[in-house]
Image: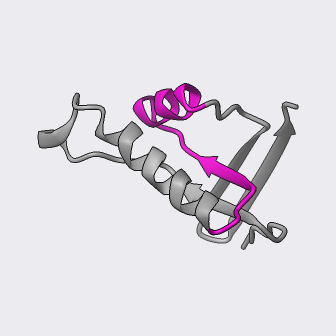
Amino acid sequence: ERSLYFGENTAYQYDGWVSPGFRNRNLGKKMLETKLRYLKSRNIERVYSSSNNAPAQKVLYALNFYPIKEIAYLRILFFKKYKEVQLR
């Protein structure tokens, strides 16, 4: 299995999702903005995120997140394949 390790003052948030009944109200962006304010208050200087769904990616781009690498991981029973491509 793979593990993610980050330095001090760094946070990782995985994806974003809004329940269908609450979509199209800008809630995903508002939730992420709230999370980022909280992290800043805790002296977090860098935030990494991972998402493979288009609406969440749109929110990330709107808040000035940008891709730095692509990671693909495939696991079927005992077969494991990992690929990483640095973008920046």
Q: Is residue 39 above or below residue 34?
A: below
Given residues 71 and 48, the one toward you in this image is 48
Outermost residue, left side = 21
- The picture places residue 65, in percent across and down from the top left corner, at 65, 35
Asked whether, in this view, residue 32 is left or right of residue 65, the answer is left
Q: Quadrant of the N terminus?
A: bottom right
- The picture places residue 78, in percent across and down from the top left corner, at 67, 71
Given residues 84 and 47, the one toward you in this image is 47
Name the image colouring. Answer: one colour
Q: How many marks?
A: 0
Q: Quadrant of the C terminus?
A: top right
- The picture places residue 35, in percent across and down from the top left corner, at 48, 56
Q: Residue at coordinates 29% horizontally, 40% vertically from top-left?
A: 27
**Quarter-wise, where is residue 84 in the image?**
top right
Q: Is residue 27 above or below residue 49?
A: above
Q: Which residues are magenta?
A: 42-63
Asked whether, in this view, residue 8 is left or right of residue 20, the answer is right
Q: Residue at coordinates 72% horizontally, 33% vertically from top-left?
A: 67
Outermost residue, front side = 41
| Residue 43 part of the magenta segment | yes
Q: Is residue 9 above or below residue 13?
A: below
Q: Residue at coordinates 38% horizontally, 49% vertically from top-left?
A: 31
Q: Is residue 23 above or below residue 14?
A: above
Q: Residue at coordinates 84% horizontally, 38% vertically from top-left?
A: 85
| Residue 51 part of the magenta segment | yes
- The picture places residue 82, in percent across and down from the top left corner, at 77, 53
Given residues 72 and 10, the one toward you in this image is 10
